[in-house]
C-alpha cells in the first residue's frame, strides 16, 4: 500500500504526461502480481466495492468527529476521502500496512452490516497518505487524470511491448489482469480473444504534407465528419466501439441490433440528413450527431429525429477470417461484396472518389467546404490494416482552415514546461461596430499554433498589458489582434457569443493590426453551416 | 463572576491597551507599538516607539531601513508601561525573535501569542507556556485536518527526491523570513552539507540570522553561478518566484514548497507544486488545542485564521471563547 500511495500522490502532483507515464511504468514493472493488477484497475476506474461508498466514509467520520468540525474540514479540503484520511487519528508512520491485494481482498469481503467495524481496522494500519490511497481505491473516484489510453501506454512502456498489442489484449480482461501481465511480463501466450466481441485498435492516418501523391498507388475517399467507430459482432453479440475503445453500444442500439454477420467493421458513425455532401451525401452535420453522444438511454424520439448509421471504410475480420494482413484493395473488394448482405438503413459504403490524377483530386477537395465535408483520405492501395499511425500508408488531407481576426482578451498560465508562461489564450470578436460602443465577446480559446519564439513574445505581451488578475488568469488591455485558424464554427447555447469553434489555433500574431479592425461576431455567424 | 477585561480591546487595527494607549501589532502607524515578530503583517513601519526583541528590531530595520524609536526588550524582561500596565516578552517559537506578550493590569493577566508553534526549531527559542486569564491565540491552521508531520519526514522526502534526480535541481518555495532559514538549518541537521543556492530576496535575511549566531553553512546566490552548477542542488526562493520568469534559468527544476497548506492536495496543485513539503512555522490543530489546554485560561480570544473551528472546539470543551475580527493578518504562504 505504501508504494501505491506514493504513486498516487506523485501522479496527483505531476502535470507532464511523460512524467506520469514514467511513474506508472516504473510502478507496473517493479510491483509484484497481483498488486500491480489491482492498482491498474483502481487507476482506470475498474474497481467497485458495493459496501464502501462516499456516504460510508462520511458516516464513519461523523461517528468519531464532531459534525460541525467535520463539515468545516470537508468544506475546506473539498474531498471526502482526503478529509477523512487527514482527520483519522492514525500513526505518523504505519508499522505494518497491508498490501494492495490484501486491502482489495478485505474491502471486497465487507458488507453493509460490518463495514463500520471493518473499515476502521484497515485505516488504523495506514498512515495519512496510505489512508487517502485506500479510500480513493475503495470508492473508485480517483480523478487524477489517468485515462485508459495513458494507462495502456504506460503498460506498453513498462514491458517494452507495442501499445496496439496492449490495446488488443486488454479488452475482455478483468482485474487483476493476470493473463495480461503473464503475457507482457512473463512471456506467456497472449489471452485469446477469438470468441469475444472485442475492440481491435484502429488504423490511423498522418496529415498529408507532401505536395503531390500519385493516385496510381493511392485511393481517395471522403473524410466524413462524424465519429470513427468499430462495429464488432461475434457469437451473437454486437458492440460499437469509439476511437478510444469505449463501448458506446448503449447509445446506438439501432446499430448494435442491425449487424448479424460475424465481422469487425471500421466506419464513420453519422446521422441521416442532407448536410454533408448535400442530398446524395445523406449525412447530417456533426452537431446533429452530438445530440446522440454520451446518452445512457435513448428515447424513441431521439431514434426517430436523429437516426444513426455507419458509413463503412474497411473490414478487419469477416466470418472468422482475419483480413488485416491483406492489401487495402483486397479488403475493399470484400467490403463491397459484404455491403449487399448488410441492412442498408444502418450501413452504407464510403465511396471511392473517382479522380483521374492528383490535380483533379485537389480541385474536388476545393469544393469540400461548400459540401460541408471535412476533407479527403488517401489510402495506399497495397496497405495492410495496421494499428496506429504508420508513415506512408494512410493520409488525411483536410480542407483548408477558416481564418478570422480576433482580439486577445485573457491569458492563462500553462502547465508543465509552460507553467511560467501565459500560454492559453481566450480571444473575442466585436458584437457590433467598435467605434460606436460595441463590446468584445469571447469566441474561443487556443493554446497551440505558435512557435516557442512566439510564445515568449506573447508571454511578455500579456505581462506588459495586464489590466486585471484572477488567480492564474490575466485580463489584457485587449489591444492585440490574433489571426485564428479553425475548422468550422457552430451555433452553441453554452457560450455568450452563441458560437463554438472547432479546433481553433493561433495562426498568426497580427501586432500590426489595430484591435478595432478585428472581425465581428456577425462574420463568424455567417460561417455557420449547421 | 465573568470579568470583562475592558482595559484590553481588540480593534480592527490591532489590540489596544487602553490605560497605556499602546498597540500590539497595529496595522496602522501609532505612537506606541509592541511588536510580536518581524513578519510584515505584524511588524509595520512608521510607529513612534516600537518595542520588540532585539532580533525583531533588527529584522524591522532591515526591512524598513530605519531604527528610529526602537526600544529593545529581552525575553523574560518586564517593561513598565503608563497606566499601571506591565508587559513581559516570552519566546513564541515562530521565527527568530518571535515573542508572546504577557500584559498585566489590575491583577489580570492577558497573553497575546502572536504567531507561534510548539515544535522544536533550530533557528529560534522554544515556546513557553505562560499561565494567564485571557489567551489571545492565533488560529492560522485551526482545522482538525491540519496535523503537520514530523519535520524530519519532510526533509527526508526532499533529500531523496534530490538524490533521485541528479541532473535536475529542487526549487523550494519558502518565506524569506523564518521558513527559509529553518529549512536550511534542518537540512544541515540532516547532514546535507552541499552549498544551498538562494534567490536574491533571501540573502540579507540569512546574513542577519548568521549575525545572531544561527549557522546556515555554505550559501550562494543563484545569480552568481552558471546554470550547470545548479544540477543536483537545492535552490530556495520566495513562493512568488516559483513558477515565474526567474525560475526559467534553473536546470529543469522540481518545484517544491515548504508550507503548512501543503497538507491539502488541491492547495499544492493550485500552486503547481510537484513536491509538497508540509513544514509550517504555525501551530497545527493538535498544538493549538494542546496549548489552550495547558495554558488553561479563563477565556480564549481567537485572532486571524479559521476562528469557526477553534470556537467550536472551545464550545465542545466548555471553554469561554470569542472570535476577534482583526484585519490585515494573512498568511497564504506559510
Image (cartoon, coloured by chain):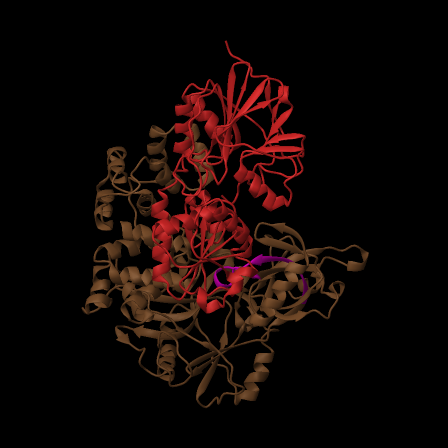
Chain colours: A brown, B red
Which picture quadrant has residue B12?
A: top right
A217 over B33 or under it: above or below: below
Q: Position of residue A291 (x, y in %)?
A: 51, 56
**B317 left or right, relative to A432:** left
Q: Residue at x 60, y 79 (%)?
A: A366
Rendered location of residue A392, percent (x, y): 42, 83
Front one among B86 and A150: B86
Q: Which residues are magenta?
A: A405-422
Give the image location of residue A380, x and y in percent.
Answer: 42, 84
Is residue A280 highlighted in magenta? no
Q: Is residue A261 visible?
A: no
Looking at the image, the residue that sits furthest to the right is A436
A458 in relation to B26, above or below: below
Residue A466 position, x and y percent, is 67, 56
Towards the viewer: A75 or A286: A75
Quadrant where the image shows the C terminus of chain A: bottom right
Q: Is residue B35 shown to the viewer in this render?
A: yes
Number of numbered discs on residues: 0
Judge from the rendering whether residue A2 lies leftward or rightward of residue A378; answer left or right: left
Is residue A410 part of the magenta span, yes or no? Answer: yes
Left or right, A62 with respect to A124, comes to right
Nearer the observer, B18 or B307: B18
Rendered image quadrant of residue A277: bottom right
Q: Is residue B213 above or below residue A231?
A: above
Amino acid at each position: 500500500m505504501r508504494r501505491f500511495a506514493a504513486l498516487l500522490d506523485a501522479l496527483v502532483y505531476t502535470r507532464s504526461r511523460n512524467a506520469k507515464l514514467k511513474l506508472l511504468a516504473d510502478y507496473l514493472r517493479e510491483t509484484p502480481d497481483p498488486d500491480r493488477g489491482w492498482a491498474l484497475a483502481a487507476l482506470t476506474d475498474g474497481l467497485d466495492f458495493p459496501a464502501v461508498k462516499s456516504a460510508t466514509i462520511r458516516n464513519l467520520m461523523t461517528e468519531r468527529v464532531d459534525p460541525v468540525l467535520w463539515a468545516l474540514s470537508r468544506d475546506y479540503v473539498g474531498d471526502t476521502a482526503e478529509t477523512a484520511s487527514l482527520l483519522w487519528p492514525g500513526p505518523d508512520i504505519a508499522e505494518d500496512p497491508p498490501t494492495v491485494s490484501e486491502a482489495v481482498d478485505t474491502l471486497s469481503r465487507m458488507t453493509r452490516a460490518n463495514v463500520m467495524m471493518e473499515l476502521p481496522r484497515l485505516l488504523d494500519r495506514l498512515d495519512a497518505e496510505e489512508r487517502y490511497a485506500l479510500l480513493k481505491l475503495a470508492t473508485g473516484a480517483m480523478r487524477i487524470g489517468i485515462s485508459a489510453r495513458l494507462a495502456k501506454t504506460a503498460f506498453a512502456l513498462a514491458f517494452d511491448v507495442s501499445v496496439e498489442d496492449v490495446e488488443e489484449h486488454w479488452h475482455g480482461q478483468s482485474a487483476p489482469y493476470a493473463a495480461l501481465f503473464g503475457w507482457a511480463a512473463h512471456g506467456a501466450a497472449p489471452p485469446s480473444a477469438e470468441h469475444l466481441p472485442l475492440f481491435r485498435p484502429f488504423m490511423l492516418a498522418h496529415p498529408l504534407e507532401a505536395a503531390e501523391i500519385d493516385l496510381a498507388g493511392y485511393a481517395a475517399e471522403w473524410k466524413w465528419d462524424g465519429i470513427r467507430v468499430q462495429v464488432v459482432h461475434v457469437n451473437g453479440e454486437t458492440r460499437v466501439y469509439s476511437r478510444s475503445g469505449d463501448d458506446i453500444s448503449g447509445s446506438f442500439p439501432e446499430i448494435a441490433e442491425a449487424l448479424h454477420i460475424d465481422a469487425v467493421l471500421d466506419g464513420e458513425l453519422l446521422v441521416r440528413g442532407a448536410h454533408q455532401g448535400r442530398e446524395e451525401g445523406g449525412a447530417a452535420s456533426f452537431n446533429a450527431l452530438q445530440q446522440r453522444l454520451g446518452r445512457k438511454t435513448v428515447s424513441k424520439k431521439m431514434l426517430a429525429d436523429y437516426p444513426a448509421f455507419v458509413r463503412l471504410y474497411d473490414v478487419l475480420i469477416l466470418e472468422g477470417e482475419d483480413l488485416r494482413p491483406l492489401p487495402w484493395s483486397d479488403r475493399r473488394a470484400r467490403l463491397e461484396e459484404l455491403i449487399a448482405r448488410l441492412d442498408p438503413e444502418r450501413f452504407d459504403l464510403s465511396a471511392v472518389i473517382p479522380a483521374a490524377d492528383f490535380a483533379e483530386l485537389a480541385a474536388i477537395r476545393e469544393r469540400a467546404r461548400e459540401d460541408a465535408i471535412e476533407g479527403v483520405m488517401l489510402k495506399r492501395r497495397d496497405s495492410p490494416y495496421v494499428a496506429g499511425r504508420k508513415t506512408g500508408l494512410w493520409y488525411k488531407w483536410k480542407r483548408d482552415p477558416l481564418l478570422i481576426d480576433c482580439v486577445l482578451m485573457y491569458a492563462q498560465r500553462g502547465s508543465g514546461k509552460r507553467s511560467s508562461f501565459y500560454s492559453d489564450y481566450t480571444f473575442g470578436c466585436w458584437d457590433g461596430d467598435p467605434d460606436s460602443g460595441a463590446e468584445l465577446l469571447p469566441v474561443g480559446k487556443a493554446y497551440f499554433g505558435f512557435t516557442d519564439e512566439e510564445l515568449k513574445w506573447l508571454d511578455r505581451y500579456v505581462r506588459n498589458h495586464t489590466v486585471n488578475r484572477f488567480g492564474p488568469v490575466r485580463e489584457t488591455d485587449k489591444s492585440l489582434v490574433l489571426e485564428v485558424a479553425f475548422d468550422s464554427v457552430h451555433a452553441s447555447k453554452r457560450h455568450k457569443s452563441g458560437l463554438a469553434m472547432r479546433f481553433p489555433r493561433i495562426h498568426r500574431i497580427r501586432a500590426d493590426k489595430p484591435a478595432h479592425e478585428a472581425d465581428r461576431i456577425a462574420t463568424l455567424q455567417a460561417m455557420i453551416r449547421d | 463572576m465573568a470579568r470583562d477585561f475592558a482595559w484590553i480591546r481588540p480593534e480592527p487595527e490591532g489590540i489596544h491597551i487602553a490605560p497605556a494607549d499602546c498597540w500590539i501589532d497595529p496595522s496602522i502607524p501609532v505612537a506606541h507599538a509592541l511588536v510580536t515578530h518581524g513578519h510584515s503583517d505584524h511588524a509595520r513601519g512608521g510607529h513612534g516607539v516600537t518595542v520588540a526583541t532585539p532580533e525583531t528590531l533588527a529584522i524591522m530595520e532591515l526591512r524598513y531601513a530605519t531604527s528610529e524609536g526602537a526600544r529593545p526588550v529581552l525575553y523574560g524582561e518586564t517593561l513598565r508601561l503608563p497606566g499601571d500596565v506591565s508587559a513581559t516578552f516570552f519566546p513564541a517559537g515562530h521565527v527568530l525573535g518571535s515573542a508572546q506578550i504577557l500584559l498585566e493590569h489590575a491583577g489580570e493577566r492577558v497573553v497575546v501569542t502572536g504567531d507561534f508553534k510548539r515544535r522544536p526549531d533550530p533557528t529560534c527559542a522554544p515556546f513557553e507556556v505562560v499561565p494567564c486569564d485571557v489567551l489571545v491565540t492565533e488560529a492560522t491552521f485551526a482545522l482538525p485536518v491540519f496535523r503537520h508531520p514530523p519535520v524530519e519526514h519532510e526533509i527526508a522526502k526532499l533529500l531523496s527526491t534530490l538524490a533521485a534526480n541528479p541532473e535536475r535541481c529542487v526549487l523550494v518555495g519558502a518565506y524569506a523570513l523564518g521558513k527559509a532559514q529553518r529549512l536550511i538549518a534542518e537540512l544541515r541537521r540532516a547532514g546535507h552539507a552541499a552549498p544551498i543556492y538562494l534567490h536574491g530576496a533571501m540573502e540579507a535575511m540569512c546574513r542577519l540570522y548568521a549575525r545572531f549566531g544561527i549557522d546556515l553553512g555554505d550559501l550562494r546566490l543563484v545569480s552568481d553561478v552558471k546554470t550547470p552548477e545548479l544540477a543536483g542542488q537545492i535552490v530556495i526562493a520566495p513562493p512568488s518566484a516559483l513558477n515565474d520568469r526567474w525560475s526559467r534559468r534553473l536546470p529543469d527544476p522540481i518545484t517544491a514548497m515548504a508550507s503548512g497548506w501543503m497538507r491539502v492536495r488541491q492547495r499544492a496543485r493550485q500552486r503547481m507544486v510537484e513536491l509538497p513539503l508540509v513544514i509550517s512555522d504555525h501551530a497545527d490543530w493538535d498544538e493549538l488545542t494542546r496549548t489552550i489546554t495547558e495554558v488553561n485560561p479563563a477565556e480564549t480570544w481567537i485572532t486571524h485564521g479559521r476562528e469557526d473551528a477553534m470556537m467550536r472546539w472551545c464550545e465542545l470543551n466548555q471553554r469561554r471563547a470569542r472570535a476577534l475580527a482583526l484585519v490585515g493578518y494573512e498568511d497564504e504562504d506559510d
